[in-house]
Image: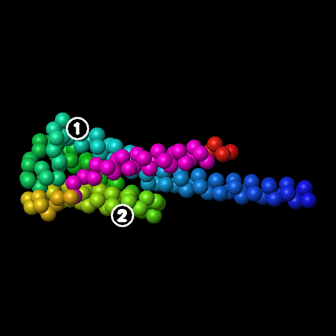
Amino acid sequence: MENKTLKNKELENEYKQKIQYFDRSEIYKRLNNLYAPLQLLRRTSKQLHDIFKDGKDFRTLPQLLNGNQFDENGKQLIAEIIKISDECRDLIVLNSGLIDNKDLRDLHLPKLLSHNILIKKAYKGEISNQLYRFEGYEFPNEIDIILDKKVNDLYADLDKLNRVN
C-alpha cells in the first residue's frame, strides 16, 4: 500500500512538473513573440515622438490632417515612427493568437492599428482636413500602460512558476 502511495505521489509530481513546463513555455512564447517586442517597439516610438514634439503639446494626427508642415528633422522622425508602426502591425497580426486579453485584442490594439494607418495616410497627404471624421482615432495613450502591465504580469507569473521548483 505504501509503495502505491509513493508511486502515485511520484506520478503526481511528474504531472505537475509537465504542467509547469507547459505554462512556462506559454509565457515565454507570449513574451518573446508578442508582448516584449511590442513593448520595446512602442517605447522606441514614444521616445522618437517625444523628440519630434520637442516639448510642445499637440496631437500629431490633427497636425498632419491640417496640412501643417514640419522641418526635415520632423519629417524624418515621423517617417521612422511610421516604420516602427508597420513593425508593430506585423508583429500584432502575425502573433494575434497570443493576445490573451480581451480588451487589448478587441479595443486597444485595433485602435492602435487604425491610428497608425491614419498617421501614415495623413503623412503621405492621402487624407486631409475633415478632422471631425477622425475624432476618436487619436493615439491610444493607454496602450503603453496596458503593455507594461501585461509584460510585468507575465514576468510575475513566470517568477511564481520558477519558485515552485
Q: Mark 1 points at which residue?
A: 51
Left or right placement of residue 154 versus residue 131 in this view: right
Q: Is residue 77 above or below residue 27?
A: above
Looking at numbered disc 1 in the image, what kind of residue is underneath it? Ile
Which quadrant does the N terminus fall into?
A: bottom right
Is the residue under label 1 in contact with that under label 2 (CB below 8 Å)? no
Q: Is residue 95 among the parts visible in the rendering?
A: no
Q: Mark 2 points at which residue?
A: 106
Q: What element carries label 1?
A: helix
Mark 2 or 1, nearer chain start? 1
Image coords of residue 115 (percent x, y): 24, 57
Membership of 140 in magenta stretch: yes
Which quadrant does the C terminus fall into?
A: top right
Please name the predominant secondary structure of the magenta segment in the image. helix
Mark 2 Cα shell of 10 Å, populated few (<14), some (14-19), many (≥20): few
Image coords of residue 19 (percent x, y): 65, 57
Image point (66%, 45%), residue name:
164
Q: Give the range drawn in magenta.
A: 137-161
